Image: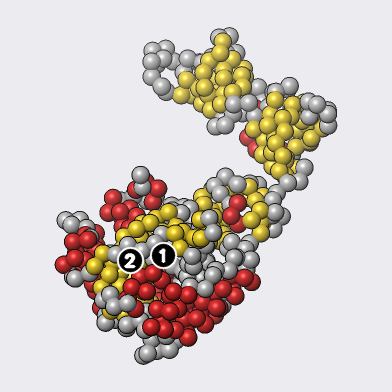
Amino acid sequence: MYNASDLRKGLKIEIDGAPWVITEFDFCKPGKGTALYRCKLKNMISGAGMEKTYRPTDKIEKPDLEEREMIYGYYDGNQYVFSDPNTYEEFPVSEETLGDSKYFLIEESVCNFVLFNGEPIEITLPTFIEKEITETEPGARGDTATNVMKPAKIDNGFEIQVPLFINQGDIVKIDTRTGTYAERVSKA
Amino acid sequence: MREFFYRADFIEVETPVKIHAPAPEEYIESVRSEGDFLRTSPELAMKVLLSEGCQRIFQIGSCFRANEHGRRHLEEFTMLEFYAAGWDYRQLAEFTAEMLNFAAGTNPFFSGHEFITVDDAFRKYAGVSAFEADADDFFDELMVTRVEPNLGREKLTFLMDYPASRASLSRISPADSRVAERWELYRNGLELANAFGELTDAEEQKKRFAAANAFRAANNMHAYPEPVEFYAALERGLPQSSGCAIGVDRLIMLLCGKDDIRDVRA
């Protein structure tokens, strides 16, 4: 349990069985009145926001949160299976939890998991991954100096925008946080 | 600021910072200093001076309140406190507005003022009567989330007549027993001052302090020693008077356009 005086920006707390992070915090004390702790909160699973005001006597639940490194293994046709590098314990993760991150999974890559009550709620991939361009129209000559972009597909069909000078078979670096092209690694 | 007080025949005083008995208040914690306490306000000592015949006094100095840290709170802060015998709390409000406008110099931030009662402000901004909010124990929450942010948007706003249960050291209004002669002053949603038509009845004051100490004991806060010198002053007789306390650091914050009180201290 946390006391209200422990509340601060960045603290993670549990409300009605869900984990929330405090995104803004303000200490208030209206004239001669009780101290109040005003919090803006973000639900760590849904991303929903809310405001809540605590009194000094309030007790606040501490969520069971754990951060662990996991290695991506394989797709079993239904779920994406990760494993703990020390215990080899397997953690299957649904497509829904991963979102667009599923397109950037590379076998053996190290990912950071946030577990709430043992269930993964947040998965952070390596910031940059390398992928081969499997499909793109050839760029028109003479346009290489501008920053005009064109669509391109990577091996799993995910589409990104790349500069005109990128050709089919090139290896490019992709930023997994935004799902955007970063730079060319090598030419075909 | 001092200039304005001198012109209005106030005497500047200095009372002890390390004291034996702070006023017992429900939600104000004092900082301990060896066997004593650092003052949370100079109120009781200044009232002793009033009982001894001082008519108009002011003081500027440090006060200390434990565990108060934030964008608008410092554990050590500078208080301007003043008392005038024979003035009522409304007269004191007019004087305070003039004083602030004078102290701000050419800065127009404190020019002009308005009055609203606590009950009207609650009805207007929180959609509920202040007395109901008080009875239902939602007063402070609504004050902070709904009422305060709307006060003093255009000019200084005096929030008048607190519910009698929140009288603190003020007297109950002779015109309406539901409210106390107490106001707070706001600008840009920031509380700047608290003022009372002072309670001069010794028995009533002792009763209120006993109730505050009982509340403190029930909530695991330490009880305070009896303020015997203050009680002696009340028995000797306090003149009809009004007094006001202003957070000087907050005035500076507003005049400098800062959002955080920690930006205006050394």
Q: Nearer the viewer, residue B154 or A122?
A: B154
Q: Residue sitting at 44 percent across and 84 percent down?
A: B202
Cα–Cα gap, marks 2 and 1? 8 Å
Q: Residues within 10 Å of mark 2 (few under 14, many from 20)?
A: many
Tell me where residue B205 appears, x and y as whole percent. 46, 81
Tell me where residue A99 appears, x and y as whole percent. 65, 38
Tell me where residue B256 appears, x and y as whole percent. 28, 50
Q: Is B213 left or right of A31, judged from the image as shown? A: right
Q: Residue sitting at 55 percent across and 9 percent down?
A: A187
**Is label 2 in a helix, a strand or a loop?**
strand
Check whether the beta carbons of the residues at disc 2 and disc 1 lie within 8 A of each other.
Answer: yes
Q: Quadrant of residue B122?
A: bottom left
Q: Is B193 left or right of B165, judged from the image as shown? A: left
Q: Is B8 left or right of A10, judged from the image as shown? A: left
Q: Vertically, is A166 above or below A62?
A: above
- Please give the chain letter of the residue carrying mark 2: B
Q: Is B92 left or right of A108, judged from the image as shown? A: left
Q: Pointer 1: what residue?
A: B41
Same chain for marks 2 and 1?
yes
Q: Amino acid at mark 2?
A: Glu
Q: How is the image coloured?
A: secondary structure
Q: Residue sitting at 47 percent across and 20 percent down?
A: A163
Q: Vertically, is A151 above or below B53?
A: above
Q: Which mark is first along the chain, 1 or 2? A: 1
Q: Pointer 2: what residue?
A: B81
